[in-house]
Image (tube, grey):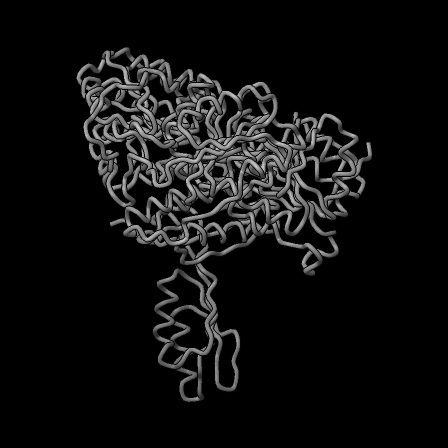
């Protein structure tokens, strides 16, 4: 069965308004986006955007092609589900009393998560992993009461030495937009 | 050399070969206008409303194939351009719009006549820029022209703050610009081209769907070669009209909602469809599930996002139409499809969609046909949107590329008159007729002022039925004749024209139609004809919205009179 969640990576020029162009495109075309995460890439002035698309409601191919049409988007490619490393970070502020604190710490340990802040009646947990791991931890912490939750959305990378920007990927069918300076 | 931002823009435009700019000035864009006299090669045409500037640039671009240019000031000047920019975007028309903006320190302060035009036009431009300093202007303008005219063309807007026009910077003209994220695919994939050739060579009932991409790519000769070699009937989209000669025996006219019945029948019964430079718009396909059910579809388009967007495609070919057809044509074997053409010609005889019935009053179709007769087909026709547009598409036959200028994707009423100005200025030696309705004409009739000032010899035919006719037709057919808000009064158009110093004639009798058109043609300057046509005439054929393309309603008539009036209906087979 084809996975319903697809991971697209868009390398975009770091110019004012680029995110607006991308989000405006999603809104206008009615694309359903699960998450979008943006940060610097290895190339100066190029940002890396990781977009998770729900393939059951939105044509992933259309998202890819329409993104590719945005002039400030340098390159778009899809990362294969079984060929990627994916991580998400979450900060979870959990209600904690002296009675529950140690139990929470045990759960956090099992998930190799960290406690980054302790308050009078709460602890803040930092957890990194794929969505499943974060979801599992969240469901366990739910019964204690979650005060605040912040998730970054998925970032992803192809396994191995392959850099999709320099090496053409056979399977993705992504059209190369080779960079030309001058 | 040091130059001001305004000089840099003008210098770059001159180097791009810009001949004419349509626009209106205002405070923010004043420094740019102040520089224009230093560049006499840039002719400025003052319009009466910025929408007219964008449409005129659009009409100019469509008939010349060059980039149309328009200027407007900040705020309302810029927002008035919006409809025209959207129109160009949907019809892939190359255009560069320069808008003035409030000075940099005022941006974001809700200053007088400030509007976020880059934000507003983001979804309706191919790309847009807010110029931040004069030093980067040369690169920006060069990039804008590159983006506007290459790949799938479209409008590009540059918003320039007033102080950036005035700022001085070293002028360095970039010899080449290549935005990192922009590299249109021109060559088709050889494997796909081979697959397409095999399908075409093996096809028994092939049809070519010819779109505006052929005109943009100047590939009419290549399409003709393909059609003639493999004996394929050609159906065009509305905007594909004139990409293939309409008097050609293989031309089966326009398809779609108001297309020729036989064109839609050809589509629906085809086993192979070769879609060239078109995008399967809903007005063409009607209900997608009922579109060409038995056909394998080959889709050639320069925009990869168009492939598979609306209909399933069996052989996708991304590339420039002309380049792809050059490669494809080498693999095409001469063929004949005698059975197919017997069938097609039968449909053509049984469903003569361009037949005009006898009448006492003036039928709008008759007016269009008479314009065709008097001009002998040698005219550029611009249209409004609605019934007038469909009749102009159906009853005039276009043999030369870019003869038919019409707002397809956006369907902008009021497009006809300003587009005609742009077309006439772009092709001063051609006869230009604007065929419009009385509704659409009233949306931009202020441009009569531009026509008068520029002495642009545009001939205007108003098919005046006193209704917003196409909507009235929908009300008649689908809303039980409840004519809500469609009857409209108009001024005496001839008097309006005369007030602008333009001659005109009101035509109320059928026998006066032809002499009136001849009089308009004999006049050196512009001329307006106000035809009082049958008020409740409908456009046929019509596919009701949401129906399959085969569910055509044809004009009710007593008996089918075959081949009475039309050179377009050949009797002989291939």
Q: Is residue B466 left or right of residue B565?
A: right
Residue at 51% x, 38% y is: B415
Q: Residue at x 50, y 20 (%)?
A: B518
Residue at left offset 22%, top offset 21%: B562
Is residue B290 at all visible to an observer of this figure? yes
Q: Is residue B81 left or right of residue A55?
A: right
- Number of marks: 0
Q: For this rendering, which residue is in front, B303 or B527? A: B527
Residue A163 seen in the figure: no
Depth check, front residue: A138 or B285 = B285
Q: Is residue B460 left or right of residue B537?
A: right
| Residue B310 sits in quarter | top left
Along the line of sight, the residue nearer the viewer: A45 or B536: B536
Would you say B388 lies left or right of A43 here? left
Picture quadrant of residue B352:
top left
* Picture quarter with the C terminus of chain B: top left
Q: Residue B139, percent across and down?
A: 67, 35
Percent position (x, y) of residue B329?
Answer: 36, 15
Percent x, y of residue B406: 46, 33
Q: What's the residue at 69%, 61% (across, down)?
A: B109
Q: Position of residue B356 (x, y in %)?
A: 31, 27
- Viewer-closest of B535 and B148: B535
Image quadrant containing the N terminus of chain B = top right
């Amino acid at each position: 069965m084809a996975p319903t969640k697809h991971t697209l990576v868009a390398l975009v020029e770091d110019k004012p308004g680029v995110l607006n162009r991308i989000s405006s495109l999603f809104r206008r075309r009615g694309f359903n986006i699960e998450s979008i995460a943006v940060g610097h890439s290895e190339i100066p002035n190029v940002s890396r955007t990781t977009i998770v698309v729900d393939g059951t409601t939105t044509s992933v191919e259309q998202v890819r092609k329409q993104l590719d049409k945005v002039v400030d988007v340098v390159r778009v490619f899809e990362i294969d589900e079984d060929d990627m490393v994916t991580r998400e970070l979450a900060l979870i502020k959990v209600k904690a009393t002296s009675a529950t604190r140690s139990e929470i710490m045990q759960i956090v340990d099992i998930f190799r998560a960290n406690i980054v802040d302790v308050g009078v009646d709460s602890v803040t947990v930092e957890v990194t992993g794929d969505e499943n791991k974060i979801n599992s931890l969240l469901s366990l912490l739910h019964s204690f009461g979650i005060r605040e939750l912040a998730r970054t959305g998925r970032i992803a990378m192809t396994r191995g030495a392959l850099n999709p920007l320099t090496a053409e990927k056979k399977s993705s069918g992504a059209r190369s937009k080779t960079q030309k300076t001058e | 050399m040091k130059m001001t931002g305004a000089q840099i823009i003008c210098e770059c435009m001159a180097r791009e070969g810009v001949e004419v700019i349509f626009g209106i000035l205002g405070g923010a864009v004043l420094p740019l206008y102040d520089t224009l006299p230093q560049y006499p090669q840039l002719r400025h045409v003052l319009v009466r409303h910025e929408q007219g500037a964008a449409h005129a640039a659009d009409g100019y671009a469509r008939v010349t194939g060059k980039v149309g240019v328009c200027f407007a000031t900040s705020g309302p000047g810029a927002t008035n351009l919006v409809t025209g920019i959207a129109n160009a975007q949907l019809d892939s028309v190359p255009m560069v719009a320069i808008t003035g903006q409030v000075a940099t320190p005022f941006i974001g302060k809700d200053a007088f006549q400030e509007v976020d035009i880059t934000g507003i036009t983001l979804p309706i431009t191919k790309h847009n820029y807010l110029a931040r300093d004069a030093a980067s202007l040369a690169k920006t303008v060069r990039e804008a022209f590159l983006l506007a005219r290459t790949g799938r063309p479209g409008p590009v807007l540059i918003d320039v703050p007033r102080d950036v026009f005035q700022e001085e910077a070293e002028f360095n003209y970039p010899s080449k610009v290549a935005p990192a994220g922009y590299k249109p695919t021109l060559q088709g994939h050889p494997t796909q081209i081979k697959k397409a050739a095999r399908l075409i060579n093996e096809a028994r009932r092939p049809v070519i769907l010819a779109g505006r991409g052929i005109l943009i790519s100047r590939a009419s000769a290549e399409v003709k070669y393909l059609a003639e070699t493999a004996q394929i009937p050609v159906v065009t989209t509305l905007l594909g009209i004139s990409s293939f000669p309409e008097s050609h025996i293989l031309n089966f006219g326009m398809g779609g909602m108001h297309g020729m019945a036989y064109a839609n029948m050809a589509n629906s019964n085809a086993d192979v469809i070769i879609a060239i430079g078109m995008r399967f718009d809903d007005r063409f396909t009607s209900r997608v599930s009922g579109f060409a059910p038995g056909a394998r579809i080959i889709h050639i388009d320069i925009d990869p996002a168009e492939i598979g967007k609306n209909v399933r495609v069996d052989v996708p070919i991304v590339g420039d139409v002309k380049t792809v057809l050059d490669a494809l044509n080498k693999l095409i074997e001469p063929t004949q499809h005698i059975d197919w053409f017997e069938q097609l010609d039968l449909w053509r005889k049984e469903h003569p969609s361009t037949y005009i019935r006898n009448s006492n009053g003036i039928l709008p179709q008759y007016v269009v046909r008479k314009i065709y007769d008097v001009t002998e087909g040698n005219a550029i026709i611009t249209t409004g949107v609605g019934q007038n547009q469909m009749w102009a598409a159906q009853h005039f036959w276009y043999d030369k590329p870019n003869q038919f200028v019409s707002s397809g994707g956006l369907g902008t009423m009021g497009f006809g008159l300003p587009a005609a100005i742009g077309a006439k200025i772009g092709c001063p030696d051609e006869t230009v007729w604007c065929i419009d309705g009385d509704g659409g004409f009233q949306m931009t009739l202020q441009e009569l002022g531009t026509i008068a000032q520029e002495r642009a010899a545009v001939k205007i035919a108003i098919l005046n039925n006193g209704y917003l006719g196409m909507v009235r037709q929908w009300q008649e057919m689908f809303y039980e004749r409840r004519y809500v808000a469609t009857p409209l009064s108009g001024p005496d158009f001839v008097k309006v024209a005369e007030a602008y110093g333009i001659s005109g004639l009101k035509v109320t009798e059928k026998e006066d139609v032809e002499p009136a058109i001849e009089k308009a043609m004999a006049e050196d300057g512009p001329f307006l004809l106000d035809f009082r046509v049958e008020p409740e005439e409908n456009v046929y054929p019509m596919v009701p919205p949401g129906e399959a393309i085969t569910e055509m309603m044809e004009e009710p008539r007593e008996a089918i009179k075959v081949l009475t009036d039309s050179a377009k209906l050949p009797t002989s087979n291939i």
